[in-house]
Image (spheres, coloured by chain):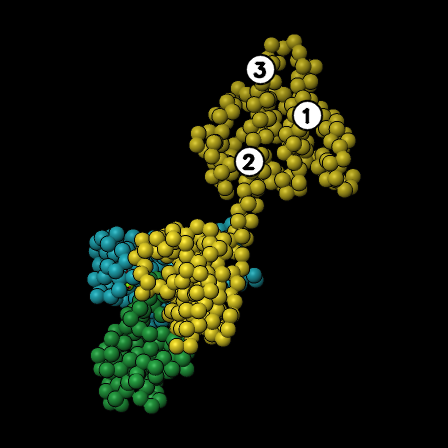
Amino acid sequence: MDDIIASSTGGHGQPGDGTADQLRWFDITDTDRRRAEALAETAGDVADEIIEAFYAHLLSFEDARRHFRTDAQIERVKRAQQTYFRELLSAPLDAGYVENRRRIGRIHERAGVTPTLYVGAYAYYLHSLGHLVMDRRGQDPQAVPLLLSLIKIAHFDMAQALETYVEAREATIEQREREMSELPTPVLQLRDGLLLIPVVGTLDSYRARSLTVKLLEGIRDHRAKAVVLDITGVAAVDSAVANHLIQTMTAARLMGATSVLTGLSADVAQALVKIGVTGETLRTAGDLQHGIEIAERLLDG
Amino acid sequence: MTSIELPAEHIQRIERDGDVVAARQTGRRIAAEMGFGRPEQALIATAISELARNIVSYAERGSITFRAEDHAGRRGLRIVAEDRGPGIPDLAQAMSDGFSTGNSLGLGLPGTQRIMDEFDIRSIPGEGVTVTVAKWISR
Amino acid sequence: MAVRVPILRQGRTLIASFQDDLSDSDILSLQGRVLEDVIRHRATGVIFDVSALDVLDSFGTRTLSDIAAAVQLRGARMAIVGIQPEVAFSMVLLGLTLSDVPTALDLETGLALLARAVP
Ligand SMILES: Nc1ncnc2c1ncn2[C@@H]1O[C@H](COP(=O)(O)OP(=O)(O)OP(=O)(O)O)[C@@H](O)[C@H]1O
Ligand SMILES: [Mg+2]
């Protein structure tokens, strides 16, 4: 059950996991599958017709039309759509099926097909199939159960596609966050031998490492003897971040440069004390100006 | 990144002091060829140095195996340090900062865990130690 | 055995330049030679130039601290110069802080550092 509920947040890279659970969630049984399969032959005959009608409907929308450039392209997607449609009725709903549906979902997502278009297309197919069933088997007492089965399967199918949408969005957000955390940290030379590094944003361990590397290369390239690390712009300083800062300053010392940490709030000072940092091991200054003065004295002294 | 033909696996025997140096040089070379940045190359070389030295110091002989890996576009280097020495009776203790039976700093194993992306240590007392570490190329 | 780390003398300062990747026994043999030289030349300072090293691991670091302590016992001061950025980076992540030995960017600043320390 966790699988189903959490799949859009935790299920990266494992499409098809828990397919059986999902089927249970949609209450899709072998009976449903058999009913749909029985319809497959009839629907196969009219698939052409349904899809032609669908594209006529689709292409009457400006937004949708933008996705198609040539008639050949339209023919190609129509053929693909027929396969998609047939599979909906007859393919075994297994991990392979789910993976394939998700793959197609990803392609649509990338092509800019909106969820509305997607869900609308399913609604259209269900609608067409509904008419088909009622036209041909209106008298059959099995007609309504068959329709209900179709609705379940279509929703299951839709869920697969929408999951890929959510995953893609998340990947985009993650990517953006990553880019944010890779915001270049400027290394500024204030004067000969003195560097200023204003640290801005969040300082996770990934970014802390790149900050350290950047600082160390800066020390080498500028032959710096003192570094002012200003953390006024750091979002949150917990003990992990404090540890990163200490590591960075220790590494600077190994290269022969002394660092001064500036812009500490009272909270941050507290965090530093908590991890056992004392004034002797770490030079700090309340504000940037004061920090620079300390660093200059270190250089001149 | 051009793809370079790497041998699937490279094994370095560790028996002497000099092998420690050879192993970390090999590791660094492979890491550089795979496209790891210089800081990562140094981390990998340092980890190898620690693992190889532990073999020489505590087990006399063993081996280090390098394996370039590629999982769904994620490239990395896996390193396995193995020996059939006395083993480690208490892994938790050996993994804590500062614990050393060799009158050393006791940072080799816990430090290696810190600098690599993956770390796994197994030991059966009397039958040796296997440490498996990996580092992935950050995209 | 070939001497892999030559010890040079400049005034009363000894300078040991590590050539490249050193084995543990190279470092250990250096320890004895440096201490002898400190006494023989009545050196007041010792500089280890490690700019050519691309790894400084727990053994290397511990040995350098040991040498520094022994040098100090003989009345001289020691500094380590030229730790490269990626070496410093690996050292801190490993947990090596070398807190008992002064460090400097390069030979020049190292010499200045020792000159200031010894009146
Ligand atoms: N391959 C091994 N075989 C047997 N014991 C080992 C092995 N590797 C490590 N140990 C044990 O684990 C302890 C901790 O190892 P670790 O590398 O962390 O520290 P160390 O080697 O003692 O010191 P350092 O690596 O800092 O110089 C060792 O002192 C030793 O008792
Ligand atoms: Mg060790």
Do the residues indicated by labels 1 and 2 lie within the same chain of the protein? Answer: yes
Q: Which residue is mark 1?
A: A124
Chain A: drawing colour: yellow
Do the residues indicated by labels 1 and 3 lie within the same chain of the protein? Answer: yes
- Marks 2 and 3, the one that precedes in the sequence: 3
SS for dot 2: helix
Q: Which residue is mark 3?
A: A145
Q: Quadrant of residue A183?
A: bottom right
* Residue B27 higher or lower than A158, as above or below: below
Q: Amino acid at mark 1?
A: Tyr
Q: Is residue B81 left or right of residue A188?
A: left
Q: Which chain is cyan?
A: B
| Along the line of sight, the residue nearer the viewer: C74 or C21 | C74
- Marks 1 and 3, the one that precedes in the sequence: 1
Label 3: few (<14), some (14–19) or many (≥20) C-alpha neighbours in 10 Å: few
Q: Amino acid at mark 2?
A: Glu
* Residue A144 higher or lower than A3, as above or below: above
Q: Quadrant of ligand 1?
A: bottom left
Q: Which chain is green?
A: C
Query: Could you tell me which chain the residue with mark 1 belongs to?
Result: A
Q: Is residue A277 left or right of residue A297?
A: left
Residue at x-position 49% and y-position 61%: A198
Label 1: few (<14), some (14–19) or many (≥20) C-alpha neighbours in 10 Å: some
SS for dot 1: helix
